[in-house]
Image: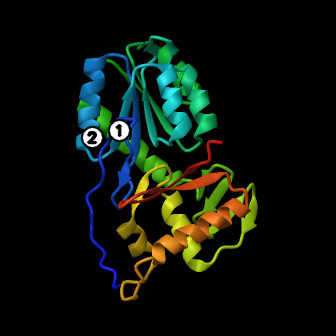
């Protein structure tokens, strides 16, 4: 089978209980933590329209539940939430997801409030009421800074992948993978916890003029699964029939 690579548009946000399908380039993922439903809906609509993947919750507990299971590039945090101060989530996010950026958006507008938020570890502090245009400009600025300092390591479960050396590690120990196994793993971990389409994987693993047997990708996924299990990598590769594959932390 001769592969044909197609270009896909970026995926948009979906409710937390739905599978997100990655359609090629992975959009930046944003979490909105805001209990004012009208404001949250406006933010989600604007962020989604800008091409980001976005989820919204109204409590600290719901935010923790989502962040536990999936990475977000940026969290937009209100402070006055029904179950506590959003500021208390900052250090927890930094420990759980070190690469995540945090923008506080709140009516607490004194100089001391702003200093407290920034000293707690927030990357930016936006006072309500604010313009959605300004919010988007600040998101873009944070995104640019994130690109500049992005870690070359991606971690899923006990597995880490070094993007610079293209080395897979389990608890700091390098594991030996064949070239295509390594290419498959890199394609999956770059979009961890999102389903990656089969045709996207084929385009990234095989050369454009290469003849590929119909079951080649399925066999390659099986080999990589077995290898990661042998190394106790703490991850699973899930199959979405007819669509593609997703790598995620093993839950048990």
Residue 75 quadrant: top left
Q: Considering only vertical position in the picture, is 18 above or below 151?
A: above
- Where is residue 23 shown, x and y percent of the image? 33, 58
In the image, residue 35 above or below residue 139: above
Query: Mark 2 = which residue?
Result: 48
Tell me residue 134's x, y (percent). 28, 33
The image quarter containing residue 82 is top left
Give how far across and how far down residue 155 sits, in percent.
61, 52
Q: Is residue 128 visible?
A: yes
Image coordinates for residue 209, horizontal then vertical, percent:
36, 88
> Around disc 1, counting alpha carbons within 10 Å, would you say few (fewer than 14), some (14 to 19), or many (20 or more)?
many
**225 relative to 28, above or below:** below
The residue drawn where x is 37% and y is 40% is 18
Residue with the mark numbered 1: 54
Q: What residue is shown at x 32% (from left), y 40% (from top)?
A: 14
Comparing 53 with 165, the one in front is: 53
Alpha-carbon span between mark 2 and mark 1: 6 Å
Q: Earlier in the sequence, mark 2 or mark 1?
A: 2
């Amino acid at each position: 089978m001769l592969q044909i690579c197609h270009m896909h548009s970026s995926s948009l946000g979906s409710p937390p209980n739905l599978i997100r399908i990655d359609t090629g380039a992975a959009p930046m993922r944003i979490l909105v933590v805001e209990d004012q439903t009208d404001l949250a809906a406006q933010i989600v609509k604007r962020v989604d329209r800008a091409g980001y993947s976005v989820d919204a919750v109204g409590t600290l507990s719901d935010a923790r539940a989502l962040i536990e299971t999936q990475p977000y590039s940026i969290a937009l945090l209100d402070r006055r939430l029904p179950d506590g101060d959003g500021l208390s989530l900052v250090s927890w996010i930094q420990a759980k997801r070190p690469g995540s950026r945090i923008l506080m958006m709140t009516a607490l507008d004194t100089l001391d409030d702003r200093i407290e938020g920034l000293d707690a570890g927030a990357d930016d502090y936006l006072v309500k009421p604010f313009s959605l245009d300004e919010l988007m400009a600040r998101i873009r600025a944070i995104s640019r800074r994130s690109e500049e300092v992005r870690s070359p390591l991606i971690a899923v479960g006990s597995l880490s992948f070094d993007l610079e050396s293209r080395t897979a590690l389990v608890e700091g120990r390098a594991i030996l993978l064949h070239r295509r196994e390594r290419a498959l793993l890199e394609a999956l971990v770059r979009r961890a916890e999102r389903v990656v389409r089969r045709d996207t994987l084929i385009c990234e693993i095989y050369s454009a003029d290469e003849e590929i047997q119909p079951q080649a990708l399925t066999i390659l996924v099986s080999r990589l699964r077995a290898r990661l299990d042998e190394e106790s990598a703490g991850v699973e590769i899930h199959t979405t029939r007819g669509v593609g594959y997703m790598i995620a932390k093993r839950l048990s």
